[in-house]
Image (tube, rainbow, N blue to C red):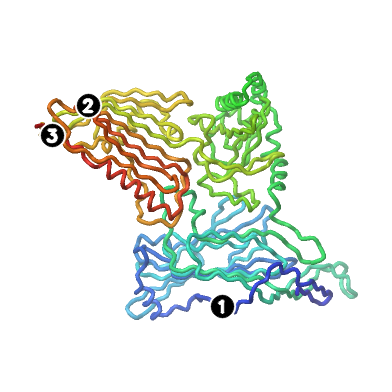
């Protein structure tokens, strides 16, 4: 039951407000209390080795959030107490703590309160305590809505144990504190608790690749005080005197408790999106408020359709698409191109020629179209919304495409929150149910390829047909090496080497010949390049680099030569170094690496030993490796190697096979071809 009682009012709302059914939880003892460490406990903490021999670790991190009555409303209270251990000097950075506070344009702010911190150092059997002084706290503005408060604990040295505690009071009910269990150092114990009265409902988003030791829900009685301002006109008081009256509010509250323990340090690995997608954490979004069972609930999250309506009305987004510009008028002249796909490509080329993307990712514009075209530069939104408008002027059905880049994080499609997006591209609907995704920020990419950082799960198409589409790669990252080499009696090789870079490999290599030659030379320092030519301007074709090069052999002729031609032309090192992996492998696009070498032996030499041919396949069509040697004549060999990763997502369970595929490929490339002179 929800009850409000005070001097002048009494209200009762039925228990239907409690939207969930939970078993009650016993009150749990907190795992840590600030300032309660003694010498015996400190010695025990220091005696236990730190996981992974890390320079620091989190011994205990405990937070709890509650909602309490305040003046004319409710407020969030978040309390955190944490204990850390510094093992070595390289872990000193973890003696600095940063707290982010939110404020709105009206000047209403979150408040940092009851901040205390202490450094413990164990000297023999004596435990010393150094309290942090208030002047050790610094603040700075992060952006228009956020400030950062940072403090560094005093007298930190190797073996120091650090403790800090603070409270945040927030009038912003939408800002229920999130919690991150995993850190960049090992964590022995991380616990978070929340208590939410029945009239607030939050959407909970839990991400974790690490198991929870505790994940409990419950329901408990809830009571809080609430102060309401009113204007008094009682007899004997001046007219319209401001006054307060206090209510006691009683209802039920949802309780949640999460615990993770012995969590390994988060280590960035190859082929991940942003770390936010992988760190163990729980996040909240205020979804609904309902104080009275007889009234309609207030929905805070809304729907994607409502978000799209708001975007359409914004001056820096929807209104931008309605503004005329010289570019839009010029695009109208392209209506004469009969093929819609070719017309869209021509419009993109028109935008590429008019403006460059020189500022970062953004969902919103900053300058009007005329200024962007005058400056010939803009941010992502300015460039690509100009593209959408130009496509429409050319008679095409074009809509903005909202997406989140890989470096920004994956989109939760069931959570309608606009902040999940940081990028806008163009979606073109073509006849026959076909589609074209266009972007005008990268002139080194052909029209059919979005930037690689945009290939991240799903994107949201706006407009009447608003929907989600998969952002999959239409091309692979493709490297092809072909070589015709003459072997000499010293083991050296001379000849022509052709490199092709196609698909998502091409933009990296689409550069002037001197830079391209230098890039190849840095990757193959043992080769001596005598001549080079390249073709890289045509976006519809692969980048081609043709080299005449020499690989020196020994000082003198040798009767027996050991050749590894594919290894010497450079299969990349195995990117999967770790023997185990907790996270999935998430690549933007598939990978294809192909090598073919035709090798001519010196006169009088013959092959006496060849590596065996090999084929290795990943389960479920995930990829394969092929190695093959063919004797084309008595004096020539053709050596072929192919490595293909056909998928972009491999689970942690598939990681071992993926790593082994690379391992076997590298081992096979390293096996020698034995050539001897009789």
Q: Residues within 10 Å of mark 2 (few under 14, many from 20)?
A: few
Which quadrant: the N terminus?
Answer: bottom right
Q: Residues within 10 Å of mark 1 (few under 14, many from 20)?
A: few
Nearest to N terminus: mark 1 or mark 2: 1
> Which quadrant would residue 461 be assigned to in this image?
top right
Q: Secondary structure at mark 3?
A: strand
Determine the CA span between mark 3 and mark 1. Answer: 78 Å
Residue 481, percent from left and from top: 34, 31
Residue corresponding to mark 1: 28
Residue at 69% across / 75% down in the picture? Answer: 222
| 369 relative position to 494: left or right | right
Residue corresponding to mark 2: 633
Residue 403, percent from left and from top: 59, 43
Q: Looking at the image, which residue sits at the far right?
A: 235
Q: Nearer the viewer, mark 3 or mark 2?
A: 2
Determine the CA span between mark 1 and mark 2. Answer: 80 Å
In the displayed structure, 311 sits above or below 1; it is: above
Asked if the residue under mark 2 is in contact with the one under mark 3, i.e. CB atoms within 8 Å, the reply is no
Which quadrant: the C terminus?
Answer: top left
Nearest to N terminus: mark 3 or mark 2: 2
Q: Secondary structure at mark 2?
A: strand
Residue at 42% across / 39% down in the picture? Answer: 591
Residue corresponding to mark 3: 676
Residue 540, percent from left and from top: 48, 26
Q: Is residue 165 visible?
A: no
Q: Secondary structure at mark 1?
A: loop
Q: Residues within 10 Å of mark 3 (few under 14, many from 20)?
A: some
In the displayed structure, 30 sits above or below 153; it is: below
| 172 relative position to 8: left or right | left
């Amino acid at each position: 039951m929800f009850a409000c009682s005070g001097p002048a009012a009494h209200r009762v709302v039925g228990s239907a407000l409690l939207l969930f059914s939970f078993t009650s939880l016993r009150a749990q003892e907190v795992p840590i209390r600030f300032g309660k460490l003694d010498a015996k406990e400190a010695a025990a903490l220091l005696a236990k080795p730190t996981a992974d021999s890390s320079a620091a670790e989190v011994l205990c991190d405990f937070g709890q959030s509650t909602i309490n009555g305040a003046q004319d409303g409710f407020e969030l209270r978040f309390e955190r107490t944490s204990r850390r251990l510094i093992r070595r000097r390289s872990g000193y950075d973890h003696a600095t703590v940063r707290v982010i506070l939110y404020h709105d344009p009206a000047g209403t702010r979150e408040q940092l309160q009851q901040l205390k911190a202490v450094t413990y150092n164990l000297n023999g059997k004596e435990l010393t305590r150094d309290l942090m002084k208030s002047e050790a706290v610094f603040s700075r503005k992060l952006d228009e809505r956020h400030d950062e408060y940072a403090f560094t604990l005093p007298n930190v040295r190797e073996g120091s144990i650090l403790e800090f505690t603070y409270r945040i009071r927030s009038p912003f009910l939408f800002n229920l504190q999130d919690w991150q269990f995993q850190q960049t150092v090992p964590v022995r114990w991380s616990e978070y608790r929340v208590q939410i009265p029945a009239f607030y409902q939050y959407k909970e988003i839990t991400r974790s690749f690490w198991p929870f030791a505790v994940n409990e829900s419950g329901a408990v009685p809830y009571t809080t005080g609430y102060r309401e301002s009113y204007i008094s006109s009682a007899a004997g008081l001046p007219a319209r005197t401001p006054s307060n009256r206090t209510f006691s509010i009683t209802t039920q509250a949802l309780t949640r408790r999460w615990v993770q323990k012995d969590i390994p340090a988060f280590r960035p690995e190859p082929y991940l999106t942003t770390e936010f997608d992988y760190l163990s954490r729980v996040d909240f979004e205020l979804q609904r408020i309902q104080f009275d069972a007889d009234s309609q609930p207030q929905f805070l999250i809304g729907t994607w359709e409502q978000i799209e309506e708001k975007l359409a009305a914004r001056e820096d987004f929807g209104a931008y698409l309605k503004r005329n510009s010289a570019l839009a008028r010029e695009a109208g002249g392209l209506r004469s191109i009969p093929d819609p796909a070719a017309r869209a490509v021509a419009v993109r080329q028109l935008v590429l020629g008019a403006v460059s993307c020189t500022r970062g990712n953004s969902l919103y514009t900053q300058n009007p179209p005329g200024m962007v075209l005058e400056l010939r530069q803009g941010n992502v939104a300015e460039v690509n919304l100009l593209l959408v408008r130009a496509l429409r002027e050319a008679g095409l059905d074009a809509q903005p495409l909202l997406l989140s880049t890989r470096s920004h994080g994956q989109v939760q499609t069931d959570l309608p929150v606009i902040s999940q997006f940081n990028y806008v591209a163009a979606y073109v609907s073509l006849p026959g149910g076909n589609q074209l995704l266009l972007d005008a920020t990268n002139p080194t990419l052909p029209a059919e390829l979005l930037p690689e950082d945009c290939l991240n799960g799903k994107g949201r198409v706006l407009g009447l047909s608003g929907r989600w589409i998969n952002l999959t790669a239409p091309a692979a990252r493709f490297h092809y090496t072909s070589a015709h080499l003459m072997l000499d009696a010293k083991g050296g090789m001379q000849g022509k080497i052709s490199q092709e870079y196609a698909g998502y490999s091409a933009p990296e290599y689409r550069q002037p010949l001197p830079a391209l030659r230098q890039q190849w030379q840095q990757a193959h320092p043992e080769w001596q390049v005598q001549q080079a030519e390249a073709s890289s301007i045509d976006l519809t074709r692969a980048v081609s680099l043709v080299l005449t090069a020499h690989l020196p052999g020994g000082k003198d002729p040798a009767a027996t030569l050991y050749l590894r031609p594919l290894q010497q032309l450079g299969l990349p090192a195995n990117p999967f170094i770790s023997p185990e992996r907790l996270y999935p492998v998430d690549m933007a696009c598939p990978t294809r690496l192909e090598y073919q070498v035709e090798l001519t032996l010196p006169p009088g030499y013959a092959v006496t030993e060849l590596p065996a041919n090999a084929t290795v396949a990943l389960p479920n069509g995930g990829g394969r490796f092929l190695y093959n040697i063919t004797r084309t004549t008595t004096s020539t060999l053709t050596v072929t190697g192919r490595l293909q990763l056909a998928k972009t997502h491999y689970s942690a369970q598939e990681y071992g096979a993926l790593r082994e595929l690379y391992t076997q490929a590298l081992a096979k490339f390293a096996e020698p071809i034995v050539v001897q002179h009789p």
